[in-house]
């Protein structure tokens, strides 16, 4: 038996030259287990890539904050209220990002370590399945060889020919190799079957834990915590400008800055069964209806627009929103522009009517874009 084991190992090390039998595949049960393990690897790689990109994103936020702080340090200090308010907002932003990003990155990296462990342990189970397949290949090789030798023996006996001592020794030697290969196959099958089931169960728990940890880190650890720190920092900065600090609010309550107080921040209805199948998932985060640059806006509806929409409309009119921080300032600028534009349009139309023959209005000429005279003031 030891000689058979030594010969079998030698054949494996040499790649078993001279064999022409087809490669033996695992049974359908093992193939199904192999496929489930592959699916776990795909999920593991996807979560790992998300974690790497998320850490890179956190580092990018820190770099952006440092760039913005460098710009502020290069600016001359002024007494303008807008500049002081902007500095307070940047300070609050930097406070929130720097307080949360490093901690969240540490937790995400810890989850990455767990994912690497899942991947490496799954690779070991793949090796066990390959060992079982290799043992199955060895067993089939020697089973076919022994069957062939027995057929040769039977044919010689049928023809009345005897079997030489060397032929008998060859059959005995291959029978020993077959017995050893069957024993190895039994051990490999037992070990791989047990470890594969354990790995699949452990993978599910570990992958769900990693998914929960990454989602919690991205949602609560980063977005919620950073936003909470920024809001608290804005309150602190606002209180520093007042002679007497205001009464502290209830614990856990964050007050949005005025520029966001009227924003529609309500999320859509959550359906657990179709959470990721809604068509809204593919839309842009900020969806703004297109507005013609020459449109005249209803001043009563300006307050219903978001800050982003107001700034876009200001730029579409060729104006500048530099120095404007609060939503009310943006609305006032658009209202003044609308009033001036309508007045200019009326004067221009009256002038063309008086100059045209018979007092008829020249329809081929359109008034200049409202608000052009404010470019020098706000541009």
Image (cartoon, grey):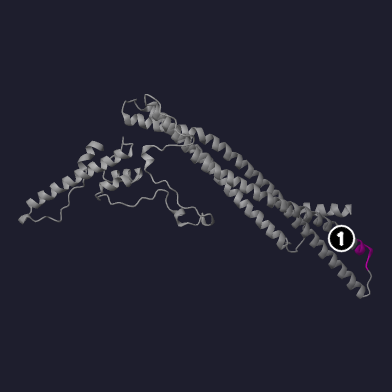
**Residue to which mark 1 is pinned:** 174
Estimate the x, y position of residue 155 in percent, counting from the top left: 88, 73
Left-right relation of 153 to 190: right
As drawn, the residue found furthest toward the top would be: 243
Q: What residue do we see at 85% from left, 58% from top?
A: 177
Q: In front: 202, or 316?
A: 202
Left-right relation of 364 to 271: left
Estimate the x, y position of residue 54 in percent, counting from the top left: 52, 42
As drawn, the residue found furthest toward the bottom would be: 159
Query: Compared to 231, does 298 lie above or below?
Result: below
Estimate the x, y position of residue 47 in percent, counting from the top left: 58, 47
Q: Residues within 10 Å of mark 1 (few under 14, many from 20)?
A: some
Q: To which quarter of the image does residue 163 belong?
A: bottom right
Magenta segment, prevailing SS (helix, strand or loop): helix
Q: Which residues are magenta?
A: 163-170
Estimate the x, y position of residue 116 in percent, counting from the top left: 64, 44
Quarter of the figure that contains the N terminus: bottom right
> Does the stretch in magenta take in 195?
no
Left-right relation of 34 to 298: right
Number of marks in the image? Answer: 1
Quarter of the figure that contains the C terminus: top left
Q: What residue do we see at 29% from left, 46% from top?
A: 302
Question: What SS does tag 1 mark?
Answer: helix
As drawn, the residue found furthest toward the left would be: 358
């Amino acid at each position: 038996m030891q000689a058979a084991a030594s010969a079998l190992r030698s054949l494996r090390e040499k790649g078993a030259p001279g064999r022409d039998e087809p490669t033996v595949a695992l049974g359908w049960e093992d193939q199904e287990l192999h496929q489930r393990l592959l699916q776990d690897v795909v999920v593991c790689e996807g979560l790992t890539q998300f974690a790497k990109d998320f850490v890179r994103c956190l580092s990018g936020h820190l770099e952006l904050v440092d760039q913005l702080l460098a710009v502020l340090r290069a600016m001359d200090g002024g007494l303008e209220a807008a500049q002081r308010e902007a500095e307070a907002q940047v300070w609050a932003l930097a406070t929130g990002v720097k307080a949360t990003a490093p901690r969240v990155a540490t937790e995400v990296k810890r989850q990455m370590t767990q994912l690497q462990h899942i991947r490496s342990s799954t690779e070991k189970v793949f090796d066990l399945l390959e060992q079982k397949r290799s043992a199955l290949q060895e067993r089939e090789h020697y089973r076919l060889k022994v069957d062939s030798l027995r057929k040769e023996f039977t044919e010689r006996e049928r023809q009345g020919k005897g079997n030489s001592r060397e032929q008998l020794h060859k059959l005995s030697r291959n029978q020993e190799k077959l017995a050893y290969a069957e024993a190895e196959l039994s051990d490999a099958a037992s070990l791989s079957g047990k470890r594969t089931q354990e790995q699949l169960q452990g993978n599910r728990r570990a992958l769900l834990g990693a998914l929960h940890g990454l989602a919690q880190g991205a949602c609560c650890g980063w977005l919620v915590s950073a936003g909470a720190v920024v809001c608290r920092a804005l309150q602190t900065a606002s209180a520093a400008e007042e002679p007497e600090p205001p009464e502290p609010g209830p614990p856990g309550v964050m007050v949005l800055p005025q520029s966001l107080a009227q924003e529609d921040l309500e999320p859509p209805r959550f359906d657990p069964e179709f959470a990721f199948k809604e068509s809204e998932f593919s839309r842009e985060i900020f969806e703004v209806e297109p507005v013609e640059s020459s449109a005249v806006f209803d001043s009563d509806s300006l307050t219903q627009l978001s800050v982003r929409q107001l700034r876009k409309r200001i730029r579409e009119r060729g104006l500048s929103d530099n120095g404007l921080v609060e939503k009310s300032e943006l609305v006032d600028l658009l209202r003044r522009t609308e009033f001036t534009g309508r007045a200019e349009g009326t004067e221009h139309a009256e002038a063309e009517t008086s100059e045209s023959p018979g007092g008829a209005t020249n329809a081929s000429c359109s008034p200049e874009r409202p608000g052009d005279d404010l470019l020098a003031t706000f541009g």
